[in-house]
Amino acid sequence: MKRRNFVAKSSLSGLAALLVVDIIYKKFMPLGYTPVALQESDPFKLFNKDKGMVVLNDKPWNIEAQAHLLDDRVTPNKSIFVRNNGLIPEDIDVDTWTLTIDGESVKQEKTYTLSELKSKFKHHTYQLTLECGGNGRSEFDPPAKGNQWTVGAVYCASWTGVRLRDVLEDVGIKDDAVYFGYHSADTHLSRDPTKEPISRGAPMSKALQDETLLAFKMNGEEIPLVHGYPLRVIAGGWPASVSGKWLQRISIRNIVHDGTKMTGTAYRVPCKPVAPGEKVADEDMCIIESMPVKSLITYPKSGAVLSKNKKLSIRGHAWAGELEVAKMEYSIDFGATWHHCTIEKPANRLAWQHFSADISFPQEGYYEVWAKATDSNGVSQPMLLPGWNPKGYLNNACHRIAVKIA
Ligand SMILES: Nc1nc2c(c(=O)[nH]1)N[C@H]1C(S)=C(S)[C@@H](COP(=O)(O)O)O[C@H]1N2
Ligand SMILES: [Mo]
């Protein structure tokens, strides 16, 4: 990994932001000098991540968790994956940070300071599952370009903020509004200020849900810089790309938002199933909305060795986009037979649900534990791969861990 490049290209204020505190005597610091704290540092330190996280890309930063790191009921920052399309903003000044609501379908454009947002509207806290649309991409064949996420691009944190709906009510929205689109402070990889790294959104029905927040806190604290400080739109249950970090502007559109990564193959899949590798016409691609049912065994870690005559207590989480998980099962015989897990109700709508089961193994040897969730519409996870699509989205195949009984 080219860590040195990263440091050299960052401005001094950017470095200060990463250090979290100001460099007091920065006027005496030699030009081009890298502070010791950063020389010694690595992405895990920069972003406060667990050493077990896996860096998939450093330009831009993309870092994923592993199943066993996601064992907490509410994911702590150290295990939260990082997905950036561009460069993390530098020089964030919360005192001058504003959010503007504009677009064809607002009665009149309006701008709020952060403190206005916080004081004018009621605060709400929800646990919300965010999964990258490309989570699981690494398994598709033919392979899809992009970050090769395995299973770790998902988390459920607790978010506190104001409802987007309440703010939109205050602004005044016209009857022809169909979509919202976000605009953020991150920089395009080319550093071209006229280009946005990403600008996505969702239909008004999603904007108006109780749980769609303009969040300023994650897990009860300021949102970490890399996760969108100081303001982020959060749309749980939808591809996490809808949850714009470093939020500066929301446009209320009278058309489907046409921002960067809303068109072509970006976050879109064939409307009807296609054969692997098949070319799909643009008009036959549909925008991903609610994410599919999925689950993750977070304990034990794959590769666990157990002694005979002992029961294994597995646990993990399951989620189903905008739906609830109705049933959770496990198999130790490659899906030939399935057994019930206990599945809890979600803390709130769009939060992942916790499951557990006690498993007995008939004899010594190698086993795989497979986990399968079924949503409230009766739709289950596929055992291996779901439908192929050009960019490798929506892989919700059953999670599998290896267990040895010795
Ligand atoms: N401004 C901005 N928002 C963004 C992105 C980005 O690159 N820039 N990436 C999106 C994508 S594709 C994902 S999967 C999530 C990742 O959120 P996380 O880094 O908190 O895990 O943020 C979304 N919001
Ligand atoms: Mo994503």
Image (cartoon, rainbow, N blue to C red):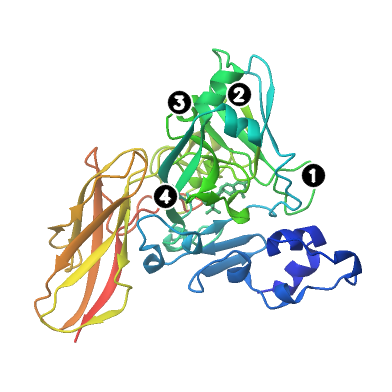
Do the CB atoms of the residues marked 4 and 2 lie less than 8 Å apart?
A: no
Task: State the residue at coordinates (60%, 64%).
Answer: 47
* Residue with the mark numbered 1: 193
Q: Amino acid at mark 2?
A: Arg
Distance CA(mark 2)–CA(mark 3):
13 Å
Q: Amino acid at mark 3?
A: Ser
Mark 2 burial class by Cα count in 10 Å: few <14, some 14-19, many 20+: many
Distance CA(mark 2)–CA(mark 1):
23 Å
Say which mark, if any, is on residue 205. Answer: 3
Q: Amino acid at mark 4?
A: Leu
| Ligand 1 neighbours mark 3 (CB distance < 8 Å) | no
Q: Secondary structure at mark 4?
A: loop
Q: Secondary structure at mark 1?
A: loop
Identify the mark nearer the N-term, 2 or 3: 3
* Residue with the mark numbered 2: 253
Task: State the residue at coordinates (14%, 74%).
Answer: 311
* Image location of residue 181, percent across then percent down: 60, 32
Q: Would residue 69 appear left or right of 98 to someone viewing this image?
A: left
